[in-house]
């Protein structure tokens, strides 16, 4: 689908039932996401005074943020689909975004694991994370263009509501929840 081949949609169930079932992608992402939580925890512990401990509430707070980051862009995409009259395309958007999250979560989790194990490579891995973000923007924009057609404004709006709220929300909510490492 990222290559522009519509045959990729044959592999996905883009019905309403398939849309609901696509939220199981979150379960497939959990091991990799948990590794990124451990990396975030290590960053937070490093920025705290020596002897400070983080309990289980840290993981509860990060889990709340993760769920919010997963669902809020989908709600925004639903509103755009409703306002632009493309509500029939909403299941395809949700299914593809949910399942696209799996490989990106695993790659990000592996990069976080590498930073945990090899902290000297953090600048290089940070650059790789930036490249991963650019690949995500590219993939989402290509898939949204396939779903919406050549309508640049609609594609751009969907890409923005699917990606930007996560970036804004993550920093703000990490500060609010007391899990911001810097």
Image: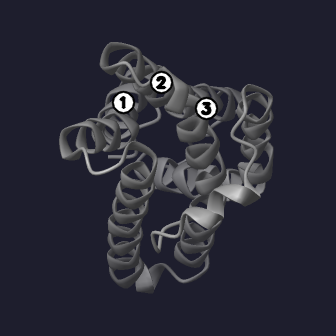
Q: Which residue is mark 1?
A: 169
Between the residue at mark 2 and the residue at mark 3, the CA separation in whole angstroms equals 15 Å
From the image, tell me which residue sits under label 2. Answer: 72
**CB-based contact (under 8 Å), mark 2 and mark 1:** yes
Colour basis: one colour
Classify residue 116 by image quadrant.
Answer: bottom right
Q: Does residue 112 appear anywhere in the picture?
A: yes
In the picture of the structure, the residue carrying the numbered disc 3 is 91
Which of the image's four quarters has the N terminus? bottom right
Foreground: disc 2 or disc 1:
2
* Mark 2: few/some/many CA within 10 Å (<14, 14-19, 20+): some
Label 3 sits on a secondary structure element that is helix
Q: State the SS at label 1.
A: helix
- What secondary structure is found at the residue carrying circle 2? helix
Give the image location of residue 40, x and y in percent.
52, 51
Nearest to N terminus: mark 2 or mark 1: 2
């Amino acid at each position: 689908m990222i290559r522009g081949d519509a045959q990729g949609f044959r592999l996905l169930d883009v019905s309403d039932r398939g849309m609901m079932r696509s939220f199981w992608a979150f379960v497939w992402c959990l091991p990799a996401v948990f590794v990124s939580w451990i990396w975030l925890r290590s960053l937070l512990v490093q920025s705290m005074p020596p002897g400070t401990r983080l309990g289980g509430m840290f993981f509860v707070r990060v889990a709340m943020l993760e769920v919010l980051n997963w669902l809020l862009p989908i709600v925004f995409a639903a509103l755009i689909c409703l306002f632009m009259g493309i509500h029939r395309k909403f299941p395809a958007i949700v299914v593809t975004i949910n399942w696209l999250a799996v490989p990106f979560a695993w790659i990000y989790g592996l990069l976080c694991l590498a930073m945990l194990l090899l902290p000297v490579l953090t600048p290089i891995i940070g650059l790789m994370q930036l490249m991963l973000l650019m690949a995500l923007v590219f993939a989402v924009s290509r898939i949204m263009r396939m779903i919406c057609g050549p309508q640049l404004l609609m594609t751009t709006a969907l890409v923005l509501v699917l990606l930007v709220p996560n970036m804004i929300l993550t920093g703000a909510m990490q500060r609010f929840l007391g899990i911001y490492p810097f």
